[in-house]
Image (cartoon, rainbow, N blue to C red):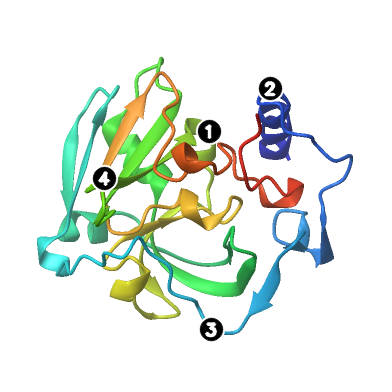
């Protein structure tokens, strides 16, 4: 579980109190963690949460710009995304507002396969994702940040399908990222840009008091002084 060791080391570096054991309940999940993280309640239906703006993007109009510290900047369109190796995997979805949608079936392409096309440079250590949605009050676009090693986890997926159907618009369709081992806000809906960066850069919610790390099994929801 090298990913967990890296996660715990990062939490300690960021001053997050790290429990001796992962916090939660139920049998072990796919990654050896308690099935339901601490403070979460399983729900049967997927709640809709957004900034108050739901872009309407047809699949044929969707594009993803990939740049920053990469050898091969590129732009993916819908057809290019579908030509990548496709996966159909079960993963859970943990929202920081305390609900969890379990055992979802996701269809899409692994972020790691997308990154391999761009060829991140050696100094790249973080990924900044931008969505097509924005805050109606300020006009600020939705962004979120991920350490590169987290983004390259095998279950971080650019999804276009959920339970065998096209990803609903209200949940980020036609394409969003999912981050099953982090709180769900770390996966940008309506994703339109990925930037590889050397330095971390807080995203929309991170600048507004949410945790920079977003680890569900240490109850890491909010930033600390």
Please tell me whether mark 2 or mark 4 is closer to you in this view. Answer: 4
Q: Within 10 Å of the Cα at label 2, are there few (<14), some (14-19), or many (20+) other Cα atoms?
A: few
User: Is 140 placed left or right of 152 in the picture?
Assistant: left
Upstream in the sequence, badge 2 or badge 3?
2
Upstream in the sequence, badge 2 or badge 4?
2
Picture quadrant of residue 44: bottom right
Q: Which residue is mark 4?
A: 140
Q: Which residue is mark 1?
A: 149
Q: CA distance from mark 4 to mark 3?
A: 29 Å
Residue 25 picture location, percent across and down: 83, 65
User: Is 92 placed left or right of 186 in the picture?
Assistant: right
**Placement of 27 over or under 1, stated as above or below:** below
Q: Within 10 Å of the Cα at label 4, are there few (<14), some (14-19), or many (20+) other Cα atoms?
A: few
Residue 40 picture location, percent across and down: 70, 66
Upstream in the sequence, badge 3 or badge 1?
3
Q: Are marks 1 and 4 in contact (CB under 8 Å)?
A: no
Q: Quadrant of the N terminus?
A: top right
Element under disc 4: loop
Q: Which residue is mark 3?
A: 45
Q: Which mark is residue 13?
A: 2
Q: CA distance from mark 2 to mark 3?
A: 36 Å
Please tell me whether mark 1 or mark 2 is closer to you in this view. Answer: 2
């Amino acid at each position: 579980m090298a990913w967990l060791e890296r996660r715990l080391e990062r939490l300690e570096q960021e001053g997050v109190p790290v429990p001796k054991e992962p916090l939660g309940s139920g049998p072990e999940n796919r990654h050896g963690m308690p099935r339901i993280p601490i403070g979460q309640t399983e729900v049967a239906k997927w709640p809709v949460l957004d900034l108050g703006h739901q872009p309407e993007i047809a699949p044929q109009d969707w594009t993803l710009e990939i740049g920053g510290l990469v050898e091969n900047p590129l732009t993916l369109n819908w057809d290019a995304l579908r030509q990548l190796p496709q996966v159909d995997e079960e993963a859970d979805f943990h929202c920081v507002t305390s609900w969890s949608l379990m055992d979802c079936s996701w269809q899409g392409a692994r972020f790691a396969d997308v990154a391999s096309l761009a060829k991140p440079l050696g100094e790249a250590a973080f990924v900044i994702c931008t969505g097509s949605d924005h805050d109606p009050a300020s006009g600020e676009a939705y962004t979120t940040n991920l350490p590169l090693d987290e983004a390259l986890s095998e279950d971080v997926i650019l999804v276009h399908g959920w339970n065998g159907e096209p990803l609903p618009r209200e949940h980020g369709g036609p394409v969003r990222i999912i981050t099953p081992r982090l709180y769900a806000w770390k996966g940008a809906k309506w994703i339109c840009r990925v930037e590889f960066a050397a330095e971390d850069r807080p995203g929309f919610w991170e600048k507004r008091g949410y945790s920079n790390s977003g680890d569900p099994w240490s109850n890491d929801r909010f930033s600390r002084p």
